[in-house]
Amino acid sequence: MAKPNFQYEKRQKELEKKRKKEEKLKRKADKGSGPDDGSEPSEVDADEPATDGAAPASE
């Protein structure tokens, strides 16, 4: 009688989990970018340094 290959089964479960997680993240990203309620620009502004057109003060 053949022994079960537990490593193969574990790897398949891990791949399935990873695939489902990626799909969920993709759906979440698509859902977030669908309606244009103006929330995206505020997120972009938070990531970028604030610039008001003035020269850098590092000199």
Image: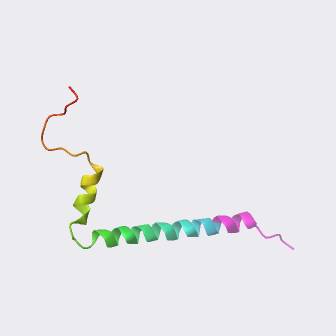
**Residue placed at 29% from the left, 68% from the top?**
33
Direction left: furthest residue: 53
**Residue placed at 13% from the left, 38% from the top?**
54
29 falls in the magenta region: no
Question: Can you give x and y, in whole percent of width and height, for residue 48 in the image?
Answer: 26, 48
Question: Can you give x and y, in whole percent of width and height, for residue 21 in the image?
Answer: 50, 68
**Residue placed at 27% from the left, 72% from the top?**
34
Direction front: furthest residue: 57
Direction top: furthest residue: 59
Query: Residue 15 appears in which quarter of the rendering?
Result: bottom right
Compare residues 29 and 47 and report the one nearer the observer. Answer: 47
Drawn side of residue 26 relative to residue 39, left or right: right
- Quarter of the image with the N terminus in it: bottom right
Q: Give the mark count.
A: 0
- Quarter of the image with the C terminus in it: top left
Q: Which residues are magenta?
A: 1-11
Query: Residue 14 appears in which quarter of the rendering?
Result: bottom right
Compare residues 53 and 23 and report the one nearer the observer. Answer: 53
8 falls in the magenta region: yes
Figure colour scheme:
rainbow
